[in-house]
Image (spheres, rainbow, N blue to C red):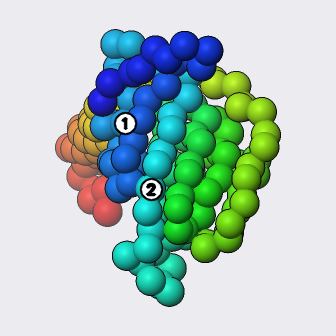
């Protein structure tokens, strides 16, 4: 991913079509943009729910990155998505028109934007370690009690 500095436009990251579905691969970590532009052609989805799923993926990227997304589709769903993942404006699948709305503001960089999947892995590891420690402490207390009382803990 690369952030573009274009005259008269806030810093932008560009995601072409399905690139928007990949978490952690849309925004340049070192040169954070102010928004994301997603140009797409959803014609190959036909009459399936594909365009809605593609839009849902774009909404997830907005939440993950804390950045608004402008999505332009020649077929499919065009939309402006704020940094919370909410739709500000939308043109339906195959609908022709123009969206005229202000670009929503960005949020500060999110935990996921800064650390990616490492944040989740750290949470999983911490939960596992606390559970293991609690189990060991419980077993130690049980063993200590059974030795003095000659009873089973279970």
The residue at which mark 1 appears reads as: 26
| Between 83 and 76, the one nearer to me in the picture | 76
Q: Residue 35 vs residue 140: left or right?
A: right
Task: Quadrant for residue 8, please give it.
Answer: top right
C-alpha distance separating marks 2 and 1: 14 Å
The residue at which mark 2 appears reads as: 40
The C terminus lies in quadrant:
bottom left
Q: Is residue 30 visible?
A: yes
Q: Is residue 137 visible?
A: no
**Which one is closest to the eye, mark 2 or mark 1?**
2
Task: Quadrant for residue 121, please give it.
Answer: top left
Pinpoint residue 110: horizontal percent, then vertical percent: 51, 26
Q: Residue at x 78, y 43 (%)?
A: 100
Q: Residue at x 39, y 13 (%)?
A: 31
The crowding category of the residue bearing disc 2, from other C-alpha atoms within 10 Å (few below 14, some 14 to 19, many at least 20), is: many
Where 25 falls versus 86 (above or below)? above
Q: Residue at x 59, y 19 (%)?
A: 9
């Amino acid at each position: 991913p690369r952030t573009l500095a274009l005259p008269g436009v806030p810093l932008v990251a560009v995601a072409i079509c399905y690139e928007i579905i990949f978490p952690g691969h849309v925004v340049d970590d070192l040169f954070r943009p102010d928004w994301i532009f997603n140009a797409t052609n959803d014609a190959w989805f036909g009459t399936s729910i594909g365009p809605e799923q593609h839009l849902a993926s774009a909404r997830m990227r907005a939440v993950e990155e804390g950045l608004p997304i402008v999505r332009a589709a020649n077929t499919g769903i065009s939309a402006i998505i704020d940094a919370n993942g909410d739709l500000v404006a939308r043109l339906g699948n195959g609908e022709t028109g123009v969206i005229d709305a202000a670009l929503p503001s960005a949020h500060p960089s999110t935990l996921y934007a800064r650390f990616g999947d490492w944040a989740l892995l750290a949470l999983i590891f911490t939960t596992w370690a606390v559970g293991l420690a609690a189990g060991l402490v419980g077993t130690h207390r049980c063993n200590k009690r059974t030795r003095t009382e000659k009873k089973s803990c279970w």
